[in-house]
Amino acid sequence: MGFVIQSILTVILTVELIIGNLGNGFIAVVNCMDWVRRRKISSVEQILIPLAISRIGVLWFILLNWWISVLYPALSVPGKIFRIFYIFLRVCNHFGAWFATCLGIFYFLKIANFSNSVFLYLKRRVKKVVSVTLLVSLVLLLINLALMNTYIDVWIDGSKRNTSYNSSSRNYAPFYKVVLFTNSMFMLVPFSVSLATFILLIISLRKHLKKMQHNAKGSRDASTTAHVKALQSVIAFLLLYATFFLSFLPQIWISDLKEKSPIILFFWVTKIAFPAGHSYVLILGNCKLRQAFLSVFVASKVLAEKMETCKSIDQKQGHGMTSSRNHG
């Protein structure tokens, strides 16, 4: 039974990695092509491109880690490579979370309507707000990396004393617990910001609907539609983000399990759902990306139909040649 569950989870994990790379790769390629064609880049594209690239990095490093742990469970990883791996993964994770949060802040300031003077000040300076948010996130990243380096140094020193200087040491479990807990605390910051923008968007929509009822207007105008679309995107983002964030917590207590165990594989599956699934939320929520995606889908469908037609024609020609030979 355990082998069956492990096989199912492995298949799901593989599918998530494939669709995640395709979705994020599609976002990056479409926006880069549009940037080259128009020779200018919009504020949203400036967020979407690094967001997609950072998530591709996360997915590939997860794939590499999973592949090594499954195929070479007893492999000894030198301390320097181990440090580079963890730091690069943390950087990609960090930017993946913060660029998504900045995208939420951008849409919130563009769509929401409040008469508050602070909000109006920020609304007029959306680009600066996003830039400052990214600068603050860089400070948090530097603190996080400093802590990570300290933890890795302590772990390597402990490994040297135990005459085993690699990632398969016995003291890996307590080290992994500390790293997971620290990363969870840092991931809580962008999640809280995204949650705050979601709540404020709901308040803004509620005020807007009340204003429309007071003015005896219809229930759907451009502002209402924009609010609803933004809320749909943020809800999907928060659900995936919450799944990603909550998957860290149980792992803190069961970090001594093997990477191949069904429980650990299950948490890998829930983690990857965020960077893989959110790319399609972004595609469906963005008009340009949605149209490009539909164009690719239609083109691939037409191509498949043409190939099927050519195949049937070739088969008929083959049958015709065979029958003519038989008559001859």
Image (cartoon, helix red, strand yellow):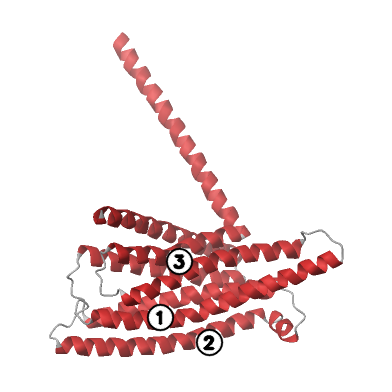
Image coordinates of residue 130 in percent, x first then y, are 59, 80
Please state which amino acid type lies under the numbered disc 3: Pro
Q: Is residue 298 above or below residue 15?
A: above
State the image quarter where residue 11 is shown. bottom left
Residue at 44% x, 82% y: name it.
Answer: 185
Please name the amino acid that badge 1 sits on: Asn
The relative height of residue 319 versus residue 176 in the rendered view (above or below) is above
Q: How many marks?
A: 3
272 in relation to 176, above or below: above
Q: Are marks 2 and 1 in contact (CB under 8 Å)?
A: no
Tell me which amino acid carries mark 2: Val
Mark 2 to mark 3 CA distance (whole Å)? 22 Å
Q: Which mark is in front, 3 or 1?
A: 1
Q: State the residue position of label 1.
A: 183
Name, please, the residue furthest toward the right.
215
Which mark is first along the chain, 1 or 2?
2
Q: Nearer the viewer, mark 2 or mark 1?
A: 1
For label 3, the residue is 275
Q: Quadrant of residue 6?
A: bottom left
Give the Cα separation between the discs numbered 2 and 1. 16 Å
Q: Mark 2: few, some, or many residues within 10 Å (few <14, many ≥20)?
A: few
Of the pair 156 and 195, the residue shown nearer to us? 195
Q: Closer to the N terminus: mark 2 or mark 3?
A: 2
Q: Label 3's element?
A: helix
Q: Quadrant of the C terminus?
A: top left
Work out whether residue 59 can be spotted: yes
4 sits left or right of 319 in the view: left
What residue did someone put label 2 on?
136
Position of residue 29 relative to residue 196, above or below, is above
Mark 3 burial class by Cα count in 10 Å: few <14, some 14-19, many 20+: many
Locate residue 132, reporting x and y percent. Answer: 58, 85
